[in-house]
Amino acid sequence: MSPRPKVGLELSAILDAAGEIADQKGMSEVTLATLAKKLGIRPPSLYNHFEGLPGLRKKLAIHGIHQLYEEMANAAIGVAGTEAVLSMSKAYVNFARKHPGIYEATLLAPNPEDEEVQQAGAKIVDLSVRVLQTYQLEGEQALHTVRGLRSILHGFSALEQKGGFKMRLNLDESLTIIIQAFLNGMEGSC
């Protein structure tokens, strides 16, 4: 017996279901067929929300970028300076830990030049620049610094996800030390 289709399924519910598949099984398992099965609908019904698998992956990437932004922004509320950078950085890494598939989706946007993807990512860049204002960075220097911070956070997250940290050291403590060293280096160059 086939599952009964859901009437009026919202895009956010579809993306949440796709995110669950990605987090549990990996992005390679996020297909129209697996998503439709999880939702109890027929695959052609998904075309009402996006254009095929590339459209799904783009929407999931944007959805993930928005979720990552919310986590980072919430972590930065009520704190400033080094504490804000550390809090936001930990939120980034924790997001990658809790949502490895959605995090992967944020990196696999079908066309990173796409305006919607750029707008979503720009919010994270803007947030990062604002949090780093304590260090009096401006223009390109601020953007280079955001790139450096993102590189650290992504590298740390990727190594952790791939089992690259085998020593019995507290990972959060390692992250704090790395971010603090990065910030100390910035203070010396400002």
Image (spheres, grey):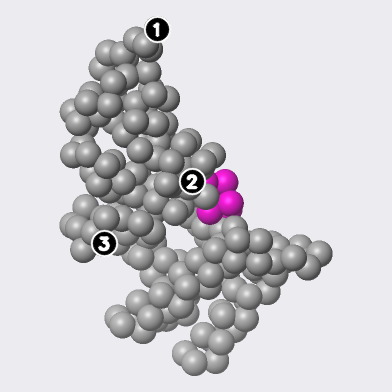
Instruction: Kindly give the residue lying farthest to the bottom in the view shown.
Output: 189
Residue 46 appears in view: yes
CA neighbours of label 2 inside 10 A, class few (<14), some (14 to 19), many (20+): some
The amino acid type of the residue labelled 2 equals Gly
Residue depicted at x 29% and y 30%:
11
Residue 30 sits above or below residue 172 on the image: above
Q: Is residue 97 magenta?
A: yes
Mark sitting on residue 61: none
Residue depicted at x 18% and y 57%:
115
Front residue of 11/53: it is 53
Q: Is residue 158 magenta?
A: no
Residue depicted at x 21% and y 52%:
116
Front residue of 133/51: it is 51
Q: Which residues are magenta?
A: 94-99
CA neighbours of label 1 inside 10 A, class few (<14), some (14 to 19), many (20+): few
Mark sitting on residue 26: 2
Residue depicted at x 34% and y 31%:
33
The amino acid type of the residue labelled 1 equals Met
Image location (x, y in percent) of residue 23: 51, 42
Q: Which residue is mark 1?
A: 1
Q: Which residue is mark 3?
A: 112
Left or right, 24 with respect to 6, comes to right
Q: Based on the displayed image, in which of its 4 quarters is residue 108 positioned?
A: bottom left
Q: CA distance from mark 1 to mark 2?
A: 28 Å
Front residue of 146/56: it is 56
| Secondary structure that dominates the magenta span | helix
Left or right, 10 with respect to 99, comes to left
